[in-house]
Amino acid sequence: MTSPSKETDGPRSTLVIACGALAREFLAVKSANGWDHMEVTCLPAIWHNYPQKIPDGIRRKIRANRAKYDEILVLYGDCGTGGLLDEVLAEEGVERIDGPHCYSFFAGADIFDRMQEEEIGTFYLTDFLVRHFDRFVIKGLKLDRYPQLLPMYFGNYKRVMFLVQFPDPVLERKAEEAAARLGLPLQVHYTGLAGVERFLETGRAGA
């Protein structure tokens, strides 16, 4: 998405509208590449529990910032919006990262699809979800108040897959504890941030 032309010699100013769960990852990629022309604004990560809020929330962010930047990118998967987010982005002329959710674009679509084919009953964790497991999983599903609901939510799962963005033994131990609370075995896959980095490269078009 392009705002009215601005004559500059440097990279085009770019706003990335991101899920709050991806802010750390965006900042890491920005810092590693020296992309000082990029800024980020985030919507609440908890909206993943209320995906109906995401499309209009992103539309408001786009319209509030359209005149301030040369380029706007969206760091969101479909994230349970049932295609409504893509409809908004098509109307607004803005691109988002490919993939239905962050698990797919962290792991890479082909690898994620293989994981699903290998075991469809996989519950995925990212660095963010491990850090905030109590808030987003235990309390988010009200398992702190109604632990008897655990089998209803997780009875059909066979494993937990921890998709690691930043290797950290402390976080891996927390992932082990999280999997144990769900009564599931843990597997770990290191993803890094290549998928996010490739997408953000598009924001350098015209640099």
Image: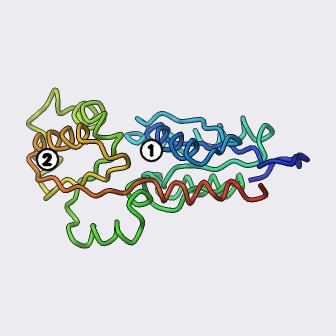
Q: Nearer the viewer, residue 61 or 177?
A: 177
The percent coordinates of residue 171 (x first, y second) are 26, 39
The percent coordinates of residue 8 (x first, y second) are 88, 46
Q: Using residue 143 as the reference point, say whether residue 30 is left or right of it.
A: right
In the rendered structure, are the residues bearing label 1 and label 2 in contact, judged by CB atoms less than 8 Å apart?
A: no
Secondary element at image label 1: helix
Number of residues whose C-alpha sits closer than 10 Å to that of mark 2, classed few (under 14), some (14–19) or many (20 or more): few
> Which residue carries the number 1 mark?
51
Q: Tag 2: residue type?
A: Met
Which of the image's four quarters has the C terminus?
A: bottom right
The percent coordinates of residue 199 (x first, y second) are 58, 58
Q: Using residue 176 as the reference point, say whether residue 134 is left or right of it.
A: right
The percent coordinates of residue 144 (x first, y second) are 17, 28
Identify the residue at image location x=29%, y=48%.
Answer: 125
Q: Nearer the viewer, residue 8 or 139?
A: 8
Answer with the quarter of the image where residue 157 lies.
Answer: bottom left
Q: Tag 1: residue type?
A: Pro
- Residue at far top of view: 145
Please say if 137 is above or below 98.
Answer: above
Answer with the quarter of the image where residue 148 lies.
Answer: top left
Which label sits on residue 152? 2
Number of residues whose C-alpha sits closer than 10 Å to that of mark 1, classed few (under 14), some (14–19) or many (20 or more): some
Answer with the quarter of the image where residue 132 lies.
Answer: top left
